[in-house]
Image (cartoon, grey):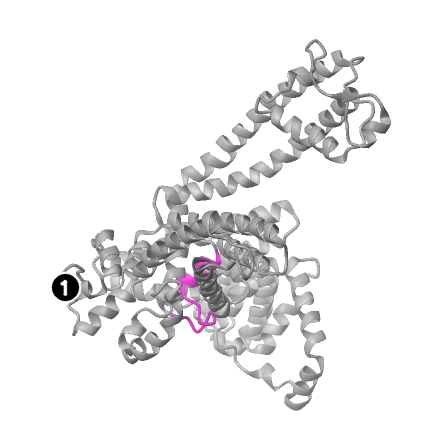
Amino acid sequence: KQRLSGDTSPSTEELKLALTWNRVDIARSELFTGDIQWKSDDLEDFMTDALVNNKPQFVHLFIENGLNILDYLTFGQLEELYRSISDSSLAYTLLVARLISYWLFSLLQRLTKVWKEGTAYRNHRCPHPWAALFIWAVLQNRREMFSICVFHSQTTESVLSALSGCKLLRELSKLERETETKYSMKELARKFENYAHDVFSQCYQSSESRSFVLLRKKSAIWGGATCLKMAMEADARYFFSHDGVQSLLSQIWWGDMNRSTEVWKLILTLFIPPLCYTNLISFRSIPQGKDIEWLYFWYAPVTAFVGNVLMYFLFLVLFAYVLLLDFKPPPPTGPSTPELGLYFWVFTIVCEEIREVGADGKNIFEKDVWHKCDLIAIILFLIVRLHITFMLGRAALCLDYMAFTIRLLHIFAIHKHLGPKIIIVGKMMKDVFFFLFFLGVWLMAYGVANQALMYTYDTSADRILRRVFYRPYLHIFGQIPVEEIDSGYVWNADCTDNTTLVDEGMEPCRNPHHNWLVVILLVVYLLVTNILLMNLLIAMFRYHTFSKVQERSDTHWKFQRFNVIVEYHSRPCLAPPFITSYTFLYNAFICNVSSISQQFTDIC
C-alpha cells in the first residue's frame, strides 16, 4: 500500500474508514507508523466519534499518537458527549430528571446568567478531563471505555477513581430495572472494588506511611473526597478488610497511645484523670510536656468510646431506678431529684444528637440505624413530658427505656466476634417479617374459623380479638385450653346462651355441634405452624442469613469497626451529661494547641 505523507486528506479518509469498520489493527499498522505527522486538531473529530460509538481501542490509539486531552475536552465538547447519550438509557433518564428539577428551582437565575455570560464557558478547558470522561463512561456502563480512562488518569488517583466507579455503579444498579443490566453493574462494581484493593495493596507493600497519606489525602478531582470516605459511601467492605486500612484505623482509634494499652488502665484514668501524667498510660511518641500528654489521652477516640460506654451504663441504671422506684406523679408530689437528674441527662443526649445532625446533615438517620433508635427514644421521652395522664406517661417511659437499652447493642459493633452477630440479628429481623406474613395468613384463617365454629353469637370485641389472634398465637407455644376447645372435657365456666346477657358482656357458651371439626382444624393448624413454618424460618436463618454473613464475618466486622471509629472520632471526649462543659474546655485548652487538633481532624 502507498503511504501518503505529504497530503493528509487521503490518510484522513483511510482513518475514517478504519474507524467505521472498527479496525484498530489496520489504523495502527498503516496510518500510525510515524510516516504521517498527525496533529492534535486532526484527531479531535475522530476522538469524538470513537467516544460516542464506544471504540476504546481507538481512544487509546489517538492518545498515544499526539491527541492532547487537555485541549480536546472543553466544556462544550463534554456537553456534546452527554447529548449523545441514548434516550432509552438510565443515564439519560437521570440527567433529564436532574435538569427538570434544576430548571424548576432556578430558572430565572440561570437565564440571567446565560444572558450575561453567553456560551463563553463552552471554550473553557475541563480541569480534570479523564475524571470527566470516566464518569461519562460509567454512567453508560461502558466497561472498556472507563478502563481506558483509569489507565490514562493520574496514578495517585487510581484507587480513588476505582472506588468512585464502584460507588456510581452500585447506585445506578439500584435504579436499573433490567435484571441483566443490574447484575452486570453489580459485578462490575465488585471488580472496581477488587482493583482498588489490589492497587492499594501494592502501595502498602511499597511504603506504609505513604499509603496512609493516600487514604486520608483529599482529592481536588473528586470534590475533596478521600479514599476512606469514598469507600464508606461505596460500601466497599472488601477494601476495608485490607490490613493496611485496618492498621491506619487502629492508629486513629488509639491516637498517640500505644495499642497495647489495657482497657482497665483507660477506665482507671477516666475516673482519676491525673493518672495520665504517670507511666500508667504509655504513648507511641514522647510527648513534649505534660499538657500534651493530657491532650493525647483525651483526644483519642478510644477514650471517648470507653467514657461513653461507662456513662451510658450509669444512665441506664439511673433510668431503671427512676422507673422502678422513684417515678412520681406531677407536682406537688414529684418530680424527685433522681428524676430531674434523668431529665437533664436526656437533655444532654439531645444536645449531642443535634450536634451530630448539624455536623453530618439529615442523612445521618438514613445511613445509621442506631441514630434512628436514638430518635425514637428521644421522641418517646418527649411524649412523657406532654400533658397526658400519669399512667400513660409511665407506659411511654417503659417503652422509652427499652429503646435506650436496645441502643446499647451498638457498643458491641467494635468487638470482633460479637460485631458480626449484630449484623446477623439485623438480617434475621428482615427474614422474620417475611415469615410473619405467612404466619399471619394462616393464623387469621384458623382463628376466624375456630371462633365461628365454637361460638354462634358473641358481640364482645375484646373476646373476639383475643380468640381470633392472641389465642391461636399461644397455641404455637403449647398453651391450648383443651377444656374449652374439646367438648369431651367438662368446662366449668359461667356462660349463657341468652343473647341479651351476651350483649351485656357475659361469657357465651360454646357450640358442641361442630366440635369434631374444631379439633381437626387445631391439629392441622399446629402441624403447619409448629412443623412446616417453624422449620421454614430455621432454614431461612441457617442457609439464607447466617451462612452468608458468617462466611464474611471478618469483612463485615472491619467495616462496622470503621463506622464506630468515625463516630467516636468526631464525638467530644466528654460523654453526657458532662458534654455541656466540653465547649468551654475545648475553647480554653484544646483549640490553643493547633498541632494536636490538626492530627485528628477529618478522618475521612
Q: Is residue 250 visible?
A: yes
Q: Nearer the viewer, residue 171 or 449?
A: 449
Q: Is residue 501 above or below residue 293?
A: above
Q: Quadrant of residue 338?
A: bottom left
Under mark 1, the amino acid is Thr
Q: Crowding near pointer 1: few (<14 within 10 Å), some, many (20+)?
A: few
> Looking at the image, which residue is at 66% across and 35% down?
437
The residue beneath circle 1 is 278
Q: Quadrant of the C terminus?
A: bottom left
Q: Is residue 222 magenta?
A: yes
Magenta segment boundaries in residue numbering = 218-234
> Looking at the image, which residue is at 86% across and 28% down?
500
Q: Nearer the viewer, residue 602 or 92?
A: 602
Q: Is residue 144 visible?
A: no
Left or right relative to 289: residue 60? right
Left or right relative to 442: residue 200? left
Q: Is residue 37 above or below residue 171?
A: below
Q: Nearer the viewer, residue 587 or 301?
A: 587
Left or right relative to 470: residue 206? left
Q: Is residue 515 magenta?
A: no
Residue 342 at what x, y percent from top left?
45, 59
Q: Dot 1: what SS?
A: loop
Residue 35 at what x, y percent from top left?
45, 71
Q: Quadrant of residue 288?
A: bottom left
> Looking at the image, which residue is at 67% across and 84% down?
109
> Looking at the image, which residue is at 64% across and 19% down?
481
Residue 521 at what x, y percent from top left?
71, 18
Residue 566 at what x, y percent from top left?
39, 61
Left or right relative to 492: residue 7? left
